[in-house]
Image (tube, helix red, strand yellow):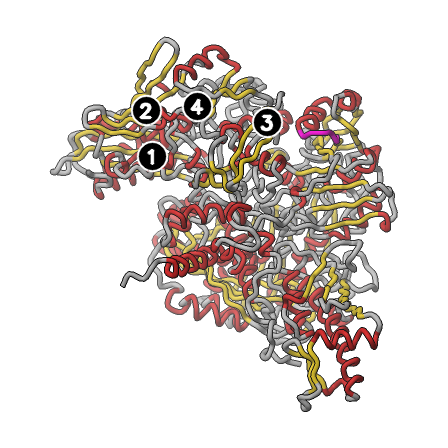
Amino acid sequence: MNKELTHLRVNGEEREIAITPNRLLLDALREDLGLTGSKRGCDDSSCGCCAVLIDGTPMLSCVALAASYEGREITTVEGLGGPGELDPVQEGYAEMGGAQCGYCTPGFMIATKALLDRNPDPTMDEIREALSGNLCRCTGYMQIYESVKYAIEKLRAKSATQAPATR
Amino acid sequence: MAKDTNGYNIIGKPMAMTDARAKVTGLGKYADDLSVPGMLIGKILHSPHAHARIRSIDTSQAEALAGVKVTATGEDARNPYGILPIGHDERAFALGKALYIGDNIAAVAATTPEVAERALDLIRVDYEQLPGWFDPEESMKASSNWINEERPQNIEKEYHHVFGDPEKGFGEADFIAEERYYAGEVNQAAMEPHATLAVWEPDNRLTVHSSTQVPFYLHRTIAAVCEMPMSQIRVIKPLIGGGFGGKSEIIPLEVAACVLAKKARKPVKITYTREEVFLAHRGRPITIVYLKVGLSRAGKITAVQARVIQDGGAYCGYGPVTVLYSGALLGAIYDIANVQYDGFRVLTNKPACGAMRGHGTVNVRFAFESILDQLSHQAGLDPLEVRRRNLLKAPCITANSLRVTSYGLPECIEKVFERSGWAEKKGNLPYGKGVGMACSHYVSGAANPIIRSNMPHTTVHIKIDRDAAVTVYTGASEIGQGSDTMQVQIAAEILGVSTDRIKLVAADTELTPIDLGSYSSRVTFMAGNACLNAAKDMRDQIVAAVARKFGCAADDFEVKDGRISHKSDAGKSLSFDEAVTVALEFHGALVARGTYAPPETARGGKFKGAGVGPSPAYSYSAQVAEVTVDPETGQVRVDKIVAAHDCGKALNPLTVEGQIEGSVYMGFGQALQEDMIWKDGRLMNPSLLEYRIPATKENPEIESIIVESIDPEGPFGAKEAGEGSLAATIPAIANAIFDAVGVRINSTPITPDKILDALREKQKLASGNGANAANKPVAAGGRL
Amino acid sequence: MTLPAFRVLQPRTVEDAVRMLDEHRSDAMVIAGGTDVIPNLQMRLFTPRVLVDVKPLRELAVIEFSARQGLHIGATATLTHILETPWMRDKFAVLASAIGTVAGPLQRNMGTIGGNLCLETRCRWYNQSHFWRQSLGGCLKKDGDICHVAPGGKFCWAAWSGDSAPAFLALDAELEIASLSGTRRVPLREFYKNDGMDRIALARNELLTAVHVPAHMAGRRGVYQKLRVRDSIDYPLAGVAVAMEVDSAGICKDARVALSAVNPAPMLVTQAGESLIGRKWSLELAERVAHAAIQTGKPLTTSGSTPVYRRDMVRVFTRRALEETWKNGHGSA
């Protein structure tokens, strides 16, 4: 199978890789771009460990053909924030026990990020629903909810300080 | 000797895990994230037959395929291995016979996964199929065609224990219940599929990066299988994506990768597919429990008799230990004088079972706590009150010689009694709603090591040099449970410094001393104590040098808030950095060590099989589950679980709560939805789509409550936290279902169809035997 | 698991796409969201030489409603897009109800309505890896000549396991199918062949382009009830969709009941409409229709749980869906 030059826009950077047409986005990220934060946990699109944002929507990179996502804005866990500038979602999962073994965590954070970008004040049911395509085997989900709530508070505080006082 | 529980700076306060940032940035590396130049991809050929003689294997066509570098079969590594010294029955690849669908026959290492997969199709194996054994109760009647010729009747191991006088005990009982329980097979299903990277080094050494909970046993096994001295092998544990016991013995891909790497003289990585994780299995076995328990009118348990059969799969694995834990922990949670236990570990043509979270205790606890609920109702007593009447009085020695040093079960029971609203709810909820309670306990590590020796179970080194950084070298394996963080906390607390100053190096056999591994909930107690001892050794060395400098006694100084200060003379105080310089000038090098081995008094009785069960300390749990059952569909919703766990002392409440909640979650999964479905040795659901671990929406709300009994020997009083809660969840849910709709389901998972069948059976009885029978409990599901 | 080698063709128009399909015929497969196709390729259930990626065809992602034309959903509209269309729940309650139960949000963000209507039938003897199936010698549907569900039979019972199809059946939907010779419309109920091996009436050179629901269906009450173990991720073990028009006097003017996951096709319950039309709510009536439903649904051991239980639930869910629709008026516009 011949390799083809493929242009992916990942975490704000243009990347060019030579891949076969059957290359999955997950493998392109992990093996061709060295972004191993996205994980493989199943082989049947049922666990969510591989989730990445495509144009802001969380999707499963394990069932996406890389070449079909040229021109789309792909965000992986590495793109949420680096060690020096954690996103509030990352901070939440780190501080509140949302990451035990950490293997499902990138997928959960991606789903959380997408939720809070659209709905900064979700109800518990909305949180459960938004995370219902991801599986975690460690936490029993309770500390994941605490992590999400931490991020919500953090984002709220952030937007309060950023919003100019109008009154 | 109760220890001071207050006044700590770091211990007892919630702390984010030290590796949390590596995990949330995606920068931390798990085994499959690793790659090295020139790395080959290995793939394993699995047996398509459950029981077959291997007449011949021809790998020549596979070897001829472009991109294939090497193949391996059983002839390449003939030495047997196994986690237990009495069970060395596995080999890198099957020799002579394949014993289950998925057994390891051969492997290839190639330049790409695609080539490796194609090469597997080119390996020709000539099999002679043999009849298979799939049902444990049938298998143990086998008169011929045994799975392992050295195990007659396909019985891997059996144990028969009698404590007290069970016959007399049953004679004193006013109520006796006798039931058969059946627990389906479950798998750890850690989110990370196993992966191993074996790197053949230029100096002909072997470096192995593997997703293991037991780097030390892996080290030994690789040496034996590859016929290399241990000194030429280095095992490194990267981040681990969950273990739960599924990575607590040597998994076939680990030896396969090493055999291939040695043969190819190249790095080889093997990563399991999710299906292969299920083929390697090592989960909790199908367990059949015939249980008889007697209760007096006063609510005292008078005798227990259990016959337990575990479907172990085709290899020994941890089998004898599992079946011994089932016996040892069966009655020892309560004050029971008369216990008879007959345990059988049976071979079948299925993947080997292993040491899944709550090893050995979960399925017998399900049976015991269910029958106790049943007996309580027979006796007209509140089942929670019955537990209160059967408590141990610690410190004590149980009937089967287990030494109990701390016992927070009474407090756990009272906590869940209050928090669940038990008094208002029990028996008072409308039809379809119910509450149930159950208790459980677990070891804080095994008092006797798997491989008997007088060496310590764990050792920690601490080094400080001119940068005044504290480096802790520990063999303990962080697998997501927080063991690294726990040791950082202990070292920082004792040395009076902030946790930032501690750098921890873990689980690398070239750098760190030995720890036996992350299994049987041993790490906090054992590695924690070793770290505590090492930190104290280091503190004493520093204080000695400082005291000498000021011409005072060491006892005059305290170590706190980054300073070493005279207790009564404020002028005699050094910062930690200054103190390190003084100490280096005095000692030359600052190296400290700590070890831990359980005391002789904790090591149990002398009877055959007494070695398994004893632990330096036991954790205790009590739980109340509240459920809603739809009597028309049989569907169960678990509304809430209140779980109290006695962990001795919560060194890090954040991670302790995470462990309790994770245990309850896994118990919930086994109780209602998880089941490995077998047809003639073939697993019908080897995927996360079909093996249904709970997701967010059906998972119950969990309220975790920490109970601190302060164990006299635990580090700061700490005991086990990561497993003990699991076993209480299943019977708590089963008992709640009885409270809700009046039927007892004696088999897991408790699926809606079983509940409907039982409800119909009950109705049939009612219409057949008059109205009175409608209130009689009906057991179902145990008859399978 | 690796993927077989294939080329990916990216058509720019529907015409492009059908030309490609026509050219490659049995060598080609259509891919859109990938949630069903990719795992199936990894299991080697198919080994196409060519994948025609229709996902970028924006013209196929349109969701529209007009009082004249009714509902039009293009084949590559994602399930999430449909769910989040503001008027969907009010106008087509049963559809929103059904689509909301598909897998989880990540899968719905990728999965398309075309893919959901063209799912492969499922069976636990079939949806397994190459190794697994080989160890058994295959089955009737793939690489073998034995059905493990009904041994001795020559019929494949692999079950239809989609959620949206029964909802569309209850709404009397039509499909729009394109080929080189133009566009044809086919009633959805004629699209499914109730054969596990040959599930849909779609030729290899045809492309499903849209699904239509007649305008008069807008505002119908309706609900979908799904039997599953988990409240997300799982495909149905049984599913019942009800759509109904009820007048102000509480009399049923029109109704359809459809089942999923208990046959090789999603199926309308025969005689359900006839029994319901002109009647007022009664439990006996609902029970009667529920009884008709279990004559239509024939679950076998193709999936988890037990056939007896799944059949039982078809009965219970049918009655409950009727009750919920009729009495609570879900989705009444």
For residue C82, the mark is: 1
Q: Reading the chain from its start, which is encountered first: label 4 or label 1?
A: 4
Contact between marks 3 and 4 (CB within 8 A): the answer is no
Q: Where is residue B782 in the image (x, y as percent from the top left)?
A: 53, 48
Q: Position of residue B773 (x, y in %)?
A: 39, 54
User: What is the number of callouts on the image?
Assistant: 4
Q: Where is residue B691 in the image (x, y as percent from the top left)?
A: 54, 41
Contact between marks 1 and 2 (CB within 8 A): the answer is no
Mark 2 or mark 4: which is in front? 4
Q: Residue B286 or B16: which is nearer the viewer? A: B16
Q: Is residue B91 visible?
A: no
Q: Residue B148 or B713: which is nearer the viewer? A: B713
Q: In this view, does B408 lie to the left or right of B318?
A: left
Q: Is residue C170 left or right of residue B615?
A: left
Q: Respond whether the residues carrying marks 1 and 2 are from the same subunit.
A: yes
User: Eyeballing the image, is A151 above or below C255?
Assistant: below
Highlighted range, magenta: B108-113
Q: Which structural element holds mark 2?
A: strand
Q: Position of residue C188 (x, y in %)?
A: 32, 22
Label 3 – label 4 distance at C-alpha: 19 Å
Q: Reading the chain from its start, which is encountered first: label 3 or label 1?
A: 3
Residues packed near mark 2 inside 10 Å, few (<14), some (14 to 19) or many (20 plus): many
**Residue ranking furthest to the top:** C181
Q: Residue B226 or B307: which is nearer the viewer? A: B226
Which amino acid type corresponds to the residue marked 1 in the rendered image? Answer: Ile
For residue C3, the mark is: 3
Residues packed near mark 4 inside 10 Å, few (<14), some (14 to 19) or many (20 plus): many
